[in-house]
Image: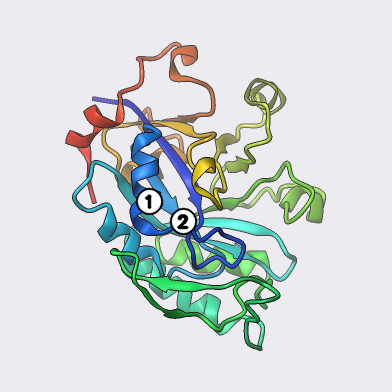
Amino acid sequence: MLRWFCGDLHLHTVLSPCSELSMGPKDLVATAIAQGLDFIAITDHNSTENVAAYQRAAAATPLQVFAGIEVSTREEIHMIALFPGLASAVDFQGFVYDHLQEGTNDPTLWGPQLLVDEEETILGESSRLLSLPIRAAYERVVQEAVERGGIIYPAHIDRRANSMVRILGFLPADLPFKVIELSRRANPDESVERYSSSGLQLITASDAHDLPQIGCVRSWFRLEAPTFGELLLACTQAEGRRISILEPERTGLQSPVTATAAADGKGA
């Protein structure tokens, strides 16, 4: 049976140099649950190295944590990529790391890039230049993500900085998923009206870099269970799955479930 689940698919951890130190795994997971989210995605800048720790921190909770990454392409376009599991995400990370800018991160300039375990123990600090664009064009980034079974779409297209629309002047017609992310500043009603005839599915996400931002905006997903396979169906509008940036009651379909009720449907 299809029902509504609530998700925030753009969250940063202490590995992202622009993130606050409050975004450790225990507090991030607890905050997401308190905000009524059924699932989240960890999408650090140009790295997946903290994903496993945050998945382990959520393992005994009803919260589903997807493996993701926010890639900054050669054109400085930000793209959200989500993967079926940790292995494919780490494999994609290998491609990203092969195309990082050369040099060493300066924490005093860009911010610290902390590697942690699920208990919030600091294991080390990444010295890679995660905050800069990688040396690969968006077409290549999209291709590499799709080849690994990933979902990939442009991030916060309504912003001036790092927006595909602002940088290219348009959305390419050959993007594999007709999905775009809007920032937390976007007005949902105005956005739905603006894109109503585009055939695009809209996602709003918090792009949280601090705990109070988690779930401040979210999207709803009509699925059978909060799994990657179901999310993939929603992103392709297949078999009745869909995404809404408006409260589900306003779609004319059934009411959303709570995070507690959704726990029974949690999947890998």
Q: Residue furthest bottom?
A: 103
Q: Nearer the viewer, residue 235 or 158?
A: 158
**Dot 1: few (<14), some (14–19), or many (≥20) neighbours within 10 Å?**
some
Q: Amino acid at mark 2?
A: Met
Provide residue 233's location: percent of width, then percent of height: 38, 40
Residue in view at x 67 percent, y 76 percent: 108
Provide residue 55's location: percent of width, then percent of height: 30, 58
The quadrant of the image that shows the N terminus is: top left
**Dot 2: few (<14), some (14–19), or many (≥20) neighbours within 10 Å?**
many
Kindly indicate the quadrant of the structure image that contains residue 261.
top left
Is 82 placed above or below 16 here?
Answer: above
Provide residue 164's location: percent of width, then percent of height: 72, 53
Instruction: State the mark number for residue 23.
Output: 2
Is 250 placed above or below 29 here?
Answer: above
Q: Report whether 266 appears left or right of 243.
A: left
Asked whether the residues under the numbered discs 2 and 1 touch, taking CB atoms below 8 Å apart as contact, a structural biologist would say yes
Element at badge 2?
loop
Instruction: State the mark number for residue 10.
Output: none
Is 17 placed above or below 61 here?
Answer: below
Q: Nearer the viewer, residue 92 or 50?
A: 50
Q: Amino acid at mark 1?
A: Asp
Instruction: State the mark number for residue 27.
Output: 1
Residue in view at x 36 percent, y 32 percent: 36
Q: Report whether 10 appears left or right of 18.
A: left
